[in-house]
Each structure stands twice: as structure tokens, then as C-alpha cells.
Image: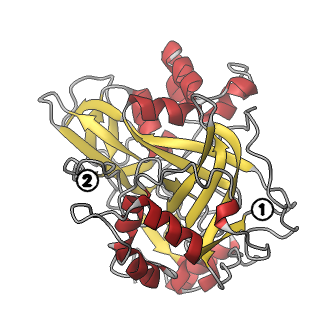
Amino acid sequence: MTRSLSLRAIIACAIVSAVGCASAPPVSRPRPAPPPGTSPAPSPALPAPGPADGAAATRPVDPTSLPGWQADRLDGLGAAIVRQCTMRTPPGPWPRLCAEFAALPRPASDAMPRPEALRGWLAARFEAWPLRDARGGTEGLLTGYYEPLLTGSRTRESARQAPLYARPADLLTIDLAGVEPRLAGMRLRGRVQGNRVVPYHSRTDIETAQPISGSELLWVDDPVDAFFLEIQGSGRVRLRDGTVLRVGYADQNGHPYRAIGRSLVDRGALRSDEVSAPTIRRWLREHPAQAAEVMRTNPSMVFFRELPVPPPAPPGEPEAGPPGSLGVPLTPQRSLAVDRSVVPLATLVWLDTVHPVDGRPLQRAMAAQDTGGAITGSIRADYFWGYGPDAERAAGEMRHRGRMWMLWPRGETPPAPAQAPTR
């Protein structure tokens, strides 16, 4: 038995020791968790929940009492629901919910239900379970992400270009749920070296020693854009002939994500209250000699795959974004990345925060269709803004406090947050 380990040995390595193995929570995109900033407070609180974490131990409220319930026009929500209802087996209670949704009245020429029918169904069919943290708090950090546009080429054209790597052939990824159900969603990543499983190459190793040369998928013109594409997890690349390709998350090297904003603060380059995606980008571009060193303080690296570019959306419907962790295309301003150990994927979530650009209340129904490496905790989410410069600006400036409610079928209790086993 050469160049392999028994499954038992691998699992023992995963559970007992973090040395010699790489483990990571379920991610579709490792993204940073910016430090909390000051922002306008959400709308006045509903009755505060009790002390337990998550939503299962709270008492639900009627969704019509949620802040901004009537103001949400629900545009795009139907498309988000349709996309998750096209799954072969939608998760949780959604097989029967999808059947109900499909029966809602709609115009003959429209695939989406009438807004008043959708609002009535949500009010009649769901209850709102407030999410809270372990201390009983009802506010958490809400950030945003988007689908960027880069320029590049299929082959390397200049020394300044940076590669986007495809998933390397020697990357070993093991899903631990089949052996230990309490490790559902946990993945072990590494590579085989002789008769051992060792951590996969870090960002520094990949960029300096080039152990995965030949795995380049595309070359992009700006190394800073390439780095931030990893944070977003998906995007588009315009080639010289005008062709636009879409790339999405394929895998990750198993090293933990470390926010380079923290590195810049530690170096005295930025103050903690200055850290945001735009200020980090600006600093990296103004200090090209130090940029690679700073970016390498994040050992995590994302690998990509090419995705089909969707056809234009029908009039009145939102464009299909890249696929999220649920496996369905994201819907701009209706898809949310969550910690799925707290909020099951496909769950509808009510959000109460403020718009990052104009400061108005941002109160609307969302669909939990994605995850992220930095999206952990009961009241933590990443808002998908879509594609284009407006989405980029909103995502870059979104770093606000907010509240979340899970919309769960009436008469049923949402699952308790998953608990990982103790070592």
C-alpha cells in the first residue's frame, strides 16, 4: 500500500491534530470579516429573545410585524426561490414549500407570482424566528460581496500578470461527514507525500516555489484584482478579443483565511477604523514593492473553474449570478451567505440593516444560498450585490450592524445550531 493512508488514520489526523493536516469549514468563498464600523442603528428592536444561541430556543413573531415588512417590494425574491426549487431535492422543508410556491397565482405571461400573492404566502405560511448570539445579543456584522470584472488572457502575456489557478491534481479533499456526522460540512485538505498526508502548499509556497505550475486557468492583468477575486470567490474576466468568461470557486488550499487588513494595521500602514476593501486596494496599489509580501500574510488560496456565462435575464427578472454553496445561481440583492451550522441553506431570512451607500433602511427578505470562510456565527451574513460598478461600491462599503430572522414554516421549530464534537 504505497502513497496512501487508511481512512481511519486520516480521520484520526483530522480530529486529533491540526499538525500535518489541513482542515477547513465548508466554504464557497473565503472572504474577510472586516472589523465592525460605526453605522446608523437598525430600526427599533422587536421583543428581545432569550439567552440561547441561534433561533431554535427563541419565540417566533408574526412576519407582518418585522421592520419594513410592507416596504419590501419583493422584486427578485421569486427568482431566488425558483432557482432553489429547481434543485433535484430542495433541502429541509422546501420540497413541499416549492409545491406551494408553484401554485401561487401569477400573470399568464410571467413565471413569477404576483407580489401580493407572494407576500400573503410568506405571511400565512411562515413565522419569524429572531437570531441571537450566545450573549443574547440580537445584532451582528453584515458585509457584502459582488461579482467583479477583470481583464486578462488565456496565456501569460507579461511578467506583471498573476495566475488564476485551477484545482491542482494533487489536492486531496476529504469530506468528514461520512465518518462522523457531527463533522458535517467539515473538509480536510492536504496532499500525499510519501506515506503521509501533509498540509497543502500555502500561498507563499505556491507563489515562490511554483509547485503547481501548469495548473494556471487564466492570467489576469492586475495582481491586486486577482487577490480580491479570491475573496469574492467568483467573477468575470474579459479577454483581449472582447470575450467575457465567468470563473467560480473550485476549491481552496486548506489554509485558514487571514485578513490582510489586520496585517496592514499591525504594520502601522492603516488605522483599524480605516480598513475597508477600497482602502486596502488603494494601499496595495500605492505600495507595489510591498504588496506581494502583505498579500502573502494570508496563506489561504482559492482555486477556480470556468463557468458558463448565463444568457440575458428575461425583462423584469434579475440576472443569474454565479452558483453559491447551495448549488444554484445567486440572485443579486436576494441571496445571502450565512453560517449554515446556524441557518440551513435555502432558508428565507429577514434582514434589518442600513444601505451602505445612502444610509436608508435596508429591510428585506433574503434566501440563504451561499457560505463564506469568514461568515461564522449566529448573526453574521454576507449580502450578494451582483455584478457591475454599483455592486462593487455597495459591497466594498457594506460593514454594518444588523439583525436577522429565520422565516420557518408555521408550527415547526428550526433546527438547533450544529455543535462540533469536542476533541
Q: Position of residue 398 (x, y in %)?
A: 60, 36
CB contact under 8 Å: marks 2 and 1: no
Q: Quadrant of the C terminus?
A: bottom right
Amino acid at dot 2:
Leu
Name the quadrant containing residue 358. top right
Task: Give the total number of marks visible in the rendering.
Answer: 2
Q: Quadrant of the N terminus?
A: bottom left
Q: Position of residue 229 (x, y in %)?
A: 42, 39
Task: Name the side, left or right, on which 46 lies relative to 246.
Answer: right
Amino acid at dot 1:
Arg
> Looking at the image, can residue 208 be seen?
no
Mark 2 to mark 1: distance in Å?
37 Å
Say which mark, if any, is on residue 132: 1
Q: Position of residue 191 (x, y in %)?
A: 45, 63
Q: Position of residue 298 (x, y in %)?
A: 57, 40
Task: Name the side, left or right, on which 265 lies relative to 191.
Answer: right
The residue most toward the top is 286
**Disc 2 vs disc 1: which is toward the camera?**
1
Q: Nearer the viewer, residue 64 or 399?
A: 64
Say which mark, if any, is on residue 307: 2
At a point 60% along the width and 33% down the height, the residue shown is 356
Assign a secondary structure to mark 1.
Answer: loop
Q: Nearer the viewer, residue 89 or 259?
A: 89
Task: Name the side, left or right, on which 381 lies relative to 88.
Answer: right
Say which mark, if any, is on residue 167: none
At a point 44% along the width and 85% down the height, the residue shown is 96
> Looking at the image, can residue 50 be seen?
yes
Q: Nearer the viewer, residue 129 or 103?
A: 103
Is 291 above or below relative to 421?
A: above
At a point 54% along the width and 78% down the height, the residue shown is 176
